[in-house]
Image (cartoon, grey):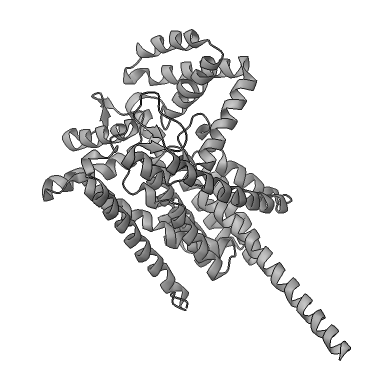
Amino acid sequence: MNIFPRNEKMIYGVLFVAGAIVHLLYLYALLRMAPLDTWNWSHADTKTYIGPAESFLQTGIFARYGEPDCFRPVGYPFFLSGALKLGVLTGVDWRIIAYVAQAIVFALSYPVIFFLARDVFGLTRLMAIECVGFTIFSGAFISYVPIIMSDAMFASTLLTGMAFSFYALQRQSILWSLLYITIITCSATVRPMLGFYPAAAVLMHWTYVQNRYQVVNRFRFFLMIFMLVFALIGVQAPALRNWINVGVFTPSESGSIALYDYLAKDVLGFREKAARYEQIHEVLIKQEHCRMLGSRIALRKKEAMGVYFDFPLETASFMFYYGMLNSIETHWNNTLFYLFRQTWYRDYADGSVRWSPVPFVIAIFFIVVYGYIYAAALILLVAMRKNMWLIASILLFLAPFAFCATNYQGARFRLWFEPFIVMAAAVIFQKAHVGWSLHRQVIISQYIKFIQSCL
């Protein structure tokens, strides 16, 4: 029995409402399983978002240590400041307000994935719904509902903005293109990793219009250029803020920190040269003032490149290792990690999180599942290898994952592009299903002819 309406436009509303309900039920179940204050919710990264949010409410400035925060862009702290303020006004725990709001916002991803699967990837209605179903089944978005970190907010806004851009080209609409620019700008203020995105997007748009309409008319060409130019401006909003505050045009300090304080530090530790890291770290401590941002970034990048050139094999090995871990970890690890302080990987050095067989078994299951999905997506990529514009677009879009391979942070590092991997894999699964159906029809037809000839 098909529970979805025949009118495809209604499916968007059904997916959103159903997704929001599932998210809220998941949140309710967690609250029933353990009191909120016993959760491991106050993670180190969490505090770096709450601090600027509280500062904004108190002083009107997103500050850290009394200075404009150069580490985190303002998008997610601004969202949290609304939850904090509403908590004061209503007397409700602000975390509950934030979680409920996230449950609703993240549910927008499901109709967006359905649209992209149907309109951009050319999937059947059933296969598009299955992509949404797998997204829920995998724990993507739903497992991030009760977590105070920006990953799912970034992924939700990025997906929504991308859907708006394709819809703008489909409808030839200035309004939808403006909505796209607005959402992508907001997404850039949530996480500062969209520097390459406008170039990737315009190549996607060019390929999309050519494949769908064969001819790129003047107005669609104008829309592509319009969205490219203003998206280029929009994604620089975090860098512009830092330039105004401290005179350095950079979206965040986090990139240089990932390069040196994570990857380079691990390489040096492996080669038993930790003293080299500590020597530079002492210099960086003396440059903690916000006005020294440019100096800190330059020093970290210089030292990181030095480590990479000195130990290229070790650097590549660590990046491959972390990239694999971040690519295969299940999103459901969030539930056990934050609620029960258990993980599939290994005990934490400080003993705060312990390895457990339950998350390990779940992780192994999803490693196999993702193995099939990545393999299918790779087959599609090889099949499209002659479309150089599309290949260039994919490479530019995935470029920020190179930073994500600098340390182990889990499935959250890939959340922003995972739905596209799933949809790409679905294209291959759909083709395989159609091919087998045709092959089966031929076999049956030949068998019937054989029986008739015998009679």
The quarter of the picture where the C terminus appears is bottom right
Q: In this view, does 413 lie above or below 301?
A: below
Residue at the (65%, 62%) spot, across then down: 211
Displayed quadrant of residue 49: top left
Judge left or right: residue 81 versus residue 222: left
Between 317 and 178, the residue placed more toward the observer is 317
Residue at the (43%, 75%) spot, across then down: 3
Q: In this view, does 6 lie above or below 366?
A: below
Residue 323 seen from this side: yes
Between 442 and 177, the residue placed more toward the observer is 442
Displayed quadrant of residue 340: top left
Q: Is residue 109 above or below residue 192?
A: below
At which x and y percent is residue 8? Answer: 47, 74
Residue 101 seen from this side: no
Residue at the (36%, 24%) spot, across then down: 350
Q: Which residue lies furthest to the right in this view?
A: 453
At which x and y percent is residue 70? Answer: 35, 28
At which x and y percent is residue 301? Answer: 51, 20
At which x and y percent is residue 304? Answer: 53, 19
Judge left or right: residue 427 versus residue 236: right
Between 258 and 326, the residue placed more toward the observer is 326
Q: Residue furthest front?
A: 357
Q: Is residue 92 above or below residue 214?
A: above
Judge left or right: residue 101 versus residue 142: left
Q: How many marks?
A: 0
Residue at the (48%, 54%) spot, across then down: 162
